[in-house]
Image (spheres, rainbow, N blue to C red):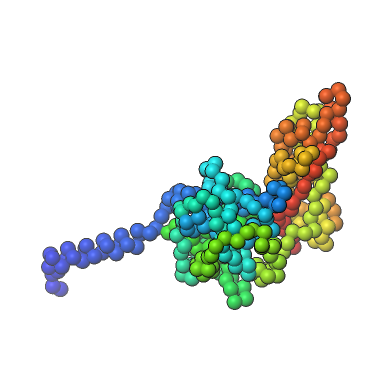
Amino acid sequence: MGQIKPRLFGFLCWTFLLIVEASSAHAQTAQEIAKKAFGSTVLLVMEDANGQPHSLGSGFLVGDGEIVSNLHVVAGAARGYAKLVGEKTKYEIEGIAAVDAERDLVVLKIIPRRSQALPIGNSDVIQVGEPVYAVGNPQGLEGTFSQGIISSIREVGSDKLLQITAPISPGSSGGPVLSGTGEVIGVSVATFKSGQNLNFAIPSNYLKALLGKSSAAQPLSHFKPIKAEDSILSGLGGRGVEGILGGKLTWSDQLYDSDGKYSFTLRNQLREAVRNIYCMVVFYDEDGNALDVNLLHYRDVIPASLAKRTTGSVDASVKRITTPPSPDNKYLSSIAPTTKVEFRILDFEIVK
């Protein structure tokens, strides 16, 4: 065998190093991906025409003053704001710039502009088994970062959905799902999941197509809630949250100055048992202004046509404002709030 000349050997070594560097240049650690993602992920707080809570969700910056989320997070709301994870500044949602109702995607404009955009990757090259990272605000808990893999790529009619093992919960809807290179390869969908560890994301290539249609902002009020049958998720058995009701809230202690612990009833009106119920409890003052919002997760099974009691807690000041004292100022005049309390069921799982 002939010897390799020193100059040729040096060239081959240099070329090999370039190839190795290029192959690993885009790989990032989970910590690096989380840091960059948090800088562009937002908590969305939506309100109705009366300024009352409508929904909570997630989103992320994709350009100068543009945020992507799920349409179901903002549909039916009159206004709202976005807040970057870990920051206090609120960015008013100017309106909707583009909509893909079938794939539950929306592009929002915010004021003032921010441009910490996340890079959008090619979801067509993603393969089963690859690592992914989901970022969002589950149950309103800001800046939650979870890790998983692509467990399947589902065919839904002529469309696709990414099935992932990274946990997604209500409040994470609209958040980014990132690849191991830190690129967005999907948009989380939390509202219509079912079963154990069955989490889905809308592939990023649908988002790329939508961003190309972005235009001047239109008022949120122009867009109504989407119907389940009109969504890509209907192919997976997606459903609404009708059939579960909250009610009969009472304070756990009738002492006026005690803590804000309470209990209430969750009633299952369906013909099937349910569990893992996510509920938002909204407390109002006598003028109809929202005082506090409590997000709760009831994990136990509720059989068909039955009800169960569960508990929660708010600041004691909410208890004092919503329930006036008795004449001696020691006990509440009622063990239940005298002002409005609203129960919103966000999600639940049917027990097979």
Quarter of the image that includes the N terminus: bottom left
Q: Please give left or right for residue 346 compared with residue 22 in the image.
A: right
Q: Relative to residue 54, is residue 204 depicted above or below?
A: below
| Residue occupying image coordinates x 59% and y 57% | 95
- Above or below, comparing residue 306 to residue 125 in the picture: above
Most extreme residue toward the bottom is 158
- Residue 344 locus on image (x, y percent): 74, 51
Residue 19, x across and y down, in percent: 29, 64
> Along the line of sight, which residue is nearer the eye, 97 or 143?
97
Front-most of residues 76 and 278: 76
In the picture shown, does residue 341 fall above or below 238? above
Q: Quadrant of the C terminus?
A: bottom right
Evaluate whether residue 92 shows in this view: yes
Residue 189 visible in the snapshot: no
The residue lying furthest to the top in this view is 328
* Residue 15 percent location from the top left of the image: 24, 65
Residue at 26%, 64% (x, y): give it. 16
The residue shown at (67%, 59%) is 221
- x and y percentages locating residue 13 in the rendered image: 21, 63
Apparent side of residue 344 relative to residue 103 in the rendered image (left or right):
right
Q: Viewer-proximal residue, 211 or 26?
A: 211
Residues 104 and 32: in front is: 104
Q: Residue at x 59, y 66 (%)?
A: 99
